Amino acid sequence: MAEPKNISFAEFQQLIRDRYFATDNSRGTHATFVLLSEEFGELATALYNNNREAHGGPPANGEEKANLEEEFADVFAWLTTLANINDVDLTHALQKYVDPDRVKGVKY
């Protein structure tokens, strides 16, 4: 596998826009959200498979570990798609976490 390329949120959002915007936009927000929800379910399964040893199950195998990474990527890509078709700039949206005066404390 090639060395991963380090890209910014803005670059990733543009990559998703360039590749998929026409199809994603025609599908619309509701249907795209349903697809994101499906990916959350797949991520939940992958998280379970990679953490079942803590609950007395067998450890995750290499395929399951690779699948976990893939599912995180899929959720991020579908979330980015939703941002694109709803005209949300993720770099701008994430500024609330960069500004120390906006987000304080610990969420439980």
Image (spheres, rainbow, N blue to C red):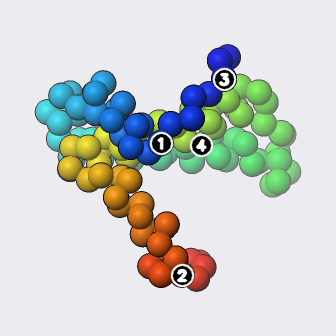
Please tell me which residue is depicted at 82% across the width and 54% down the height of the picture: 54
What amino acid is found at the position of numbered circle 2 in the picture? Lys
Circle 3 is placed at which residue position? 3
Front one among 69 and 13:
13
Separation of marks 1 and 3 at Cα, in angstroms: 16 Å
Label drawn at residue 45: 4
Q: Position of residue 78 (x, y in %)?
A: 37, 40
Question: Residue 88, how many percent across, how many down?
Answer: 26, 53
Q: Earlier in the sequence, mark 3 or mark 2?
A: 3
Q: Mark 2 points at which residue?
A: 104
Q: How far apart are marks 1 and 2 (CA)?
A: 24 Å
Position of residue 69 relative to residue 56, above or below, is above
Q: What residue type is labelled 1?
A: Ser
Marks 1 and 4 sit apart, C-alpha to C-alpha, by 28 Å
Q: Mark number for residue 8?
A: 1
* Sequence-earlier tag: 1 or 4: 1
